[in-house]
Amino acid sequence: MRILIADDSVVSRHLLDATLRRWGYEVVVACDGNEAWRILEADDAPKIAILDWMMPGMTGPAVCRKVRANAKDKDLYTYILLLSSKSQREDLIEGMEAGADDYLTKPFDQHELQVRLRPGVRILELQHELISAREELRDQATKDFLTRIWNRSSILDILSRELKRGMRENRPVGVILADLDHFKSVNDTYGHFAGDAVLREFVRRMSGSIRPYDAIGRYGGEEFLIVLPGCDSGVTENQAERMRETLANEPMWFNEESQLVTCSFGATAWLPDSLSSEETLIRVADDALYAAKRQGRNRVVFLPCSGILAEAVRVGQPDPGAK
Ligand SMILES: [Mg+2]
């Protein structure tokens, strides 16, 4: 565990430094209040700080107040011990009111320091466990258990968010629905474990072929929704074709047999200045997917979405995207 020592006295600094190192802590040293604040403000700041009260630049309590004011945007708590030669009661109250967790009077007693550090270490360990548990829960609530990509409700949220962002920034959004071909026969022939392995391998290949800011989620059993921010019709169609190829160009192996697994893709895109909603985009992508299946599978069908719909609404024409 890392500890920051901020003290303008060389003797006191060295004594603390040597003591803490002997106890196995990693020590970061600051010579005044400003330097201490710079260190504590950083992302990888030590989570325990021992701050001298009187220091040039900024006093210990002043640094303490800044740390607490800044803590709102940070996840991790900083445990702060104030170090002071002052021992009047009102001074200590001022220090604690500045947000310090505890204090130590100088010259410090080693045993007392050890005892006062203990709750800090305990709090930070507990907090670490709580944060891990929270992350784990969040992960379970938003990710698909089998494939570790977004689950249905998360990918729908992402689509909704990206569509709103697209409207605000006047940027297109591509949407692809992908459905594995004859997936039931994989399960029937090779068993459900093989089916799971196919889904995971499919996701691995798809995830490898999209950009880091694209999103892929499991929409249904063997159906996946891909959201491509900033992609117009042409780019979305090409992306779907690239995804189709990553699957169709190389067979998968299970039970020491190779088997070509293919997928059908229905693609569409929302274009700026057109009317549309998530529901319409998904409906059009679904129509496109259905057309791809009907035309023989292992192919991409792109259907334009909102532009034509909006135009159709305006001139009273039938919607050419409809089945
Ligand atoms: Mg001092």
Image (cartoon, helix red, strand yellow):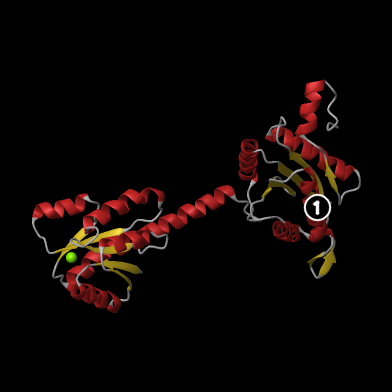
Q: Amino acid at mark 1?
A: Phe
- Mark 1 crowdedness (10 Å alpha carbons): few <14, some 14-19, many ≥20: some
Viewer-proximal residue among 322 and 64: 64
Left or right: residue 292 compared with residue 205:
right
| Residue beneath the point at 68% across and 35% down | 278
Q: Secondary structure at mark 1?
A: helix
> Where is the C terminus found, in terms of image quarters?
top right
| Residue beneath the point at 43% across and 55% down | 131
Q: Which residue is mark 1?
A: 183
Work out whether 50 lies above or below 283: below
Q: Position of residue 157 (x, y in %)?
A: 61, 41
Q: Position of residue 69 (x, y in %)?
A: 32, 48
> Where is the N terminus found, in terms of image quarters?
bottom left
Viewer-proximal residue among 139 and 306: 306
Residue furthest front as drawn: 57
Viewer-proximal residue among 86 and 121: 86
| Residue beneath the point at 73% across and 56% down | 206
Q: Position of residue 217 (x, y in %)?
A: 67, 49
Q: Quadrant of residue 219?
A: top right
Left or right: residue 19 compared with residue 318:
left
